[in-house]
Image: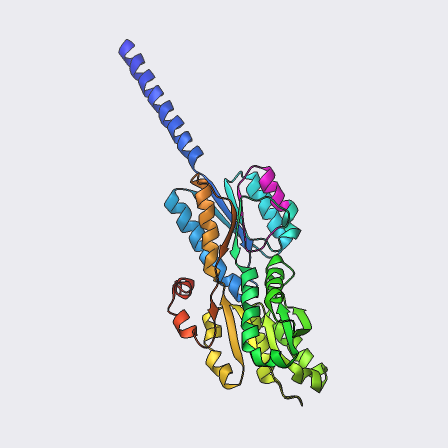
């Protein structure tokens, strides 16, 4: 009887130890939450593919759980933040719809003591764990320098009229625009600027309206378009190619950001029409770097500060070489 009691106690203790160990193991399993906008244009669509794949793969490889969420607007994204805070996740990687409008919701993450990595769109006067984004200010600066060299002869003679097409009112277009006008020659004159919401169709309509409602003299005076996005570039190029008014178009250069293959594929076509294109690399795959920072946080590594992803200039002279390089190759690794 005594031996039976001892055996029962031993088995009971063993069972308790197993349950305790299992509970400890479950408690050690950390969770990474990645929250970003849904795809309203091509760049975001590509980014989601890279982000969803990386969230799952990197978390599983490190032994962590993961949550991946996308949203159509700021209200939905704020609700998602409330949810992951309530779930007590261990780190959040956040791509805000618009940083400043989401500031209050993002603050709840910080107040809960959860490490927060901000990606792409900044939140002003905010203390996150770290930020990662493309080097937007440098993109603007380099575009300005490129325009200076391209229009060197025209600028030496006087003013060069141009248009500017921005993405939205977030920190990204502001940085690109500020960088451009810091380096651009003072003889560049911005005749009009537009906010496109990153939409090809919106940009095409905006430029068509300008071409068809402005005076012949004003239309013919435009020699360049400083544009912030590759999707938008397609709308602008379509408007230029489809114009059939009385003015003789004089647009020689259209800029863009992102360097997708669809844009590189039409470089030669528009060159034949007398329009040069320059774009600066800004890969959708760089969101993976932000997710890796989140994994680093869960691993106990020190993560802080601003992390900027460098950019490359891609024009008619080097786009074929760019297509063979690592940035382009990684971007299209899913295709």
Which residue: 37% across, 46% down? Answer: 61
Q: Quadrant of residue 192?
A: bottom right
Q: Quadrant of residue 288?
A: bottom left
In this picture, which residue range is highlighted in magenta? 105-123
| Residue 146 horizontal/vertical position (percent) | 54, 72
Is 235 one of the magenta-colored residues?
no
Q: Return the residue nearer the eye: 246 or 191.
A: 191
| Residue 131 horizontal/vertical position (percent) | 53, 50
Residue 304 visible here:
yes
Residue 150, above or below 143: below
* Colour pattern of the rendering: rainbow
Which residue: 31% across, 13% down? Answer: 5
Is 114 one of the magenta-colored residues?
yes
| Residue 126 horizontal/vertical position (percent) | 62, 46
Question: What quarter of the picture does the C terminus occupy?
Answer: bottom left
Check the image and name the residue furthest to the bottom.
246
Q: Return the residue nearer the eye: 154 or 96.
A: 154
Check the image and name the residue furthest to the front.
156
Q: Return the residue nearer the eye: 120 or 311.
A: 311
Question: What quarter of the picture does the N terminus occupy?
Answer: top left
Residue 264, above or below 57: below
Residue 1 visible here:
no
Q: Quadrant of residue 13?
A: top left
| Residue 195 horizontal/vertical position (percent) | 66, 67
Which residue: 54% across, 64% down? Answer: 139
Check the image and name the residue furthest to the left.
3
Q: Return the residue nearer the eye: 5 or 180.
A: 180
Residue 122, above or below 248: above
Residue 94, above or below 5: below
User: How many labels sit on residues?
Assistant: 0
């Amino acid at each position: 009887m005594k031996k039976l009691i001892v055996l029962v106690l031993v088995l009971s203790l063993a069972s308790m130890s197993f349950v305790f160990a299992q509970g400890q193991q479950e408690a050690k399993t950390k969770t990474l939450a990645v929250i970003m906008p849904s795809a309203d244009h091509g760049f975001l669509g590509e980014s989601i593919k890279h982000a969803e794949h990386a969230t799952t793969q990197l978390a599983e490889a490190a032994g962590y759980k993961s949550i991946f969420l996308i949203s159509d607007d700021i209200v939905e994204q704020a609700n998602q933040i409330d949810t992951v805070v309530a779930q007590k996740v261990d780190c959040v990687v956040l791509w805000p719809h618009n940083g400043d409008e989401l500031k209050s919701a993002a603050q709840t993450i910080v107040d809960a003591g959860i490490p927060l990595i901000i990606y792409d769109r900044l939140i002003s006067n905010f203390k996150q764990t770290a930020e990662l984004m493309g080097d937007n200010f440098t993109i603007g600066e380099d575009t300005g320098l490129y325009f200076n060299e391209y229009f060197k002869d025209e600028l030496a003679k006087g003013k060069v009229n141009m248009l500017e097409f921005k993405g939205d009112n977030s920190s990204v277009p502001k940085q690109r625009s500020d960088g451009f006008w810091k380096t651009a020659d003072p003889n560049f004159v911005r005749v009009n600027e537009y906010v496109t919401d990153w939409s090809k169709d919106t940009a095409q309509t905006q430029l068509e309206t300008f071409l068809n409602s402005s005076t012949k003299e004003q239309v013919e005076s435009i020699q360049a378009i400083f544009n912030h996005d590759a999707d938008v570039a397609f709308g602008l190029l379509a408007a230029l190619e489809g114009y059939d008014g009385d003015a003789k178009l004089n647009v020689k250069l259209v800029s863009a950001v992102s360097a997708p293959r669809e844009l590189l594929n039409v470089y030669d076509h528009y060159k034949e029409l007398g329009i040069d294109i320059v774009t600066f690399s800004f890969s959708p795959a760089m969101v993976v770097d932000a997710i890796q920072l989140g994994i680093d946080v869960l691993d106990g590594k020190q993560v802080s500060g601003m992390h900027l992803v460098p950019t490359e200039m891609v024009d008619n002279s080097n786009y074929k070489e760019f297509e063979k390089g690592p940035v382009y190759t990684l971007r299209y690794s899913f295709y």
